[in-house]
Image: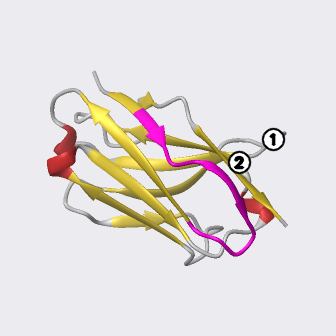
Amino acid sequence: QVQLVESGGGEVQAGGSLRLSCAASGSGFSRNVMGWYRQALGKQRELVATITSSGRTNYADSVEARFTISRDNAKNSVYLQIYSLKPEDTAVYYCAARRIDALYGMHYWGKGTLVTVSS
């Protein structure tokens, strides 16, 4: 079992930057594929980025190069750096983890952190 707690959200002006953090508890974090998703008001949750245990990253086609996912296995943490924030980045951002024995999907979710970008 993995518990995930996001932090770092808040209100920021367009053009600013934020670094979201996700702290994981439970055994085996370093082996989990981790990811960030977001859900804007009235929209479906969408993938932002994933990162494997070895650090290989994958970004959604809709995500621009303004997003960078990273992890620190020693700290059981995964991060999402967002640059040049736009109002359309406003959403609840969720951290997620895949079960070690799974090939696809995400099985553990945090409660999310709200990012609000004002113009």
Q: Residue at x 62, y 47 (%)?
A: 38
Q: Kindly state the secondary structure of the residue where label 1 is placed.
A: loop
**Label 2 belongs to which residue?**
91
Residue 68's mark?
none
* Magenta-highlighted residues: 5-17
Quadrant including the C terminus: bottom right
Q: CA distance from mark 2 to mark 1?
A: 7 Å
Q: Is residue 60 above or below residue 20?
A: below
Foreground pick, 107 / 78: 78
Picture colour scheme: secondary structure
Q: Residue at x 41, y 30 (%)?
A: 107
Coordinates of residue 27 in the picture (x, y in percent): 16, 29
Q: Residue at x 30, y 35 (%)?
A: 24
Q: Residue at x 78, y 61 (%)?
A: 88
Coordinates of residue 100 in the picture (x, y in percent): 23, 36
Q: Quadrant of residue 57?
A: bottom left
Identify which amino acid the numbered label 1 is placed on.
Leu
Quadrant including the N terminus: top left
Q: Is residue 83 left or right of residue 74?
A: right
Coordinates of residue 41 in the picture (x, y in percent): 81, 41
